[in-house]
Image: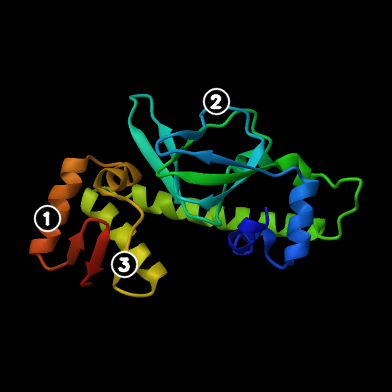
Amino acid sequence: MKKYLEILKKCDLFCGLGEENILKMLVCFGARVEFFDKKYTVFAEGYPAKYIAILLSGSVQVIQFDYNGNKNILTSVKPSEMFGEAFACAETALLPVSVVANEPSEVMLIEASHILHTCNNNCGFHNQLIYNLMKDLAKKIIMFHRRIEITSKRTTRDKLLEYLSFESKRAGKDEFYIPYDRQELADYLEVDRSGLSAEIGKMRKEGILESRKNYFKLFL
């Protein structure tokens, strides 16, 4: 597990903990690492929701299918970030979403019950872990509401501008990269890909933005 320490120290779950405590925790909680090839399912909708997962390398997407079979991308996960924790901590019986590897990825899995309930070893860092976990969940709630603000816009242009403006603010500059290709961006915004591509083309001609694959620059 030592080879993962540098990425784990960037994970919100381990904020304020030293390397020695992180290694102790991984042993105490029975953490394990699994590898998933591109397009492989990490968690499937309908599976028991009991794991807190940490992405160690690669990238994964949290997705959901509607009753018509249309795919909606809820979020993209980067190394050091957690996923699945909200459902596991809420003790949701079955997962309402799926998580799929967007490229070859390594994932650390920890049973949420090991963190939510103190063990017989009386680990001194346990309270800090619970605090860190609650803080992470609060951030995820804020991001969830942010996505609702984006997808609730009425037109494809409004959704796209809202999303790109948000990414620009998060990057702190008017040029940035997004974690989605065109189809994935359409799935995230819950719009038709052809309509999205047409709108991006119009906005280029109007001088509102420049774009190349997942690179964007705004002129607002």
x 51%, y 55%: residue: 79
* Tags 2 and 1 touching, CB below 8 Å: no
Residue that mark 2 sits on: 46
**Left or right, 69 with reference to 55:** left
Number of numbered callouts drawn: 3
Q: CA distance from mark 3 to mark 1?
A: 18 Å
Q: Identify the amino acid type marked 2.
A: Gly
Query: Could you say where residue 1 lies in the image, as x and y percent from the top left?
Result: 67, 52
Query: Could you say where residue 179 lies in the image, as x and y percent from the top left?
Result: 36, 54
Q: Work out which residue is located at the far left of the displayed protein and give it.
A: 205
Q: Identify the amino acid type marked 3.
A: Phe
Disc assigned to residue 176: 3
Q: Nearer the viewer, residue 92 or 78?
A: 78
The quarter holding residue 124 reads bottom right
Q: Secondary structure at mark 1?
A: helix
Residue count near mark 1 (Cα–Cα under 10 Å), binned few <14, some 14–19, many ≥20? some
x 33%, y 31%: residue: 70
Q: Secondary structure at mark 2?
A: loop
Q: CA distance from mark 2 to mark 1?
A: 39 Å
Residue that mark 1 sits on: 201
**Left or right, 178 with reference to 23:** left
Q: Earlier in the sequence, mark 2 or mark 1?
A: 2
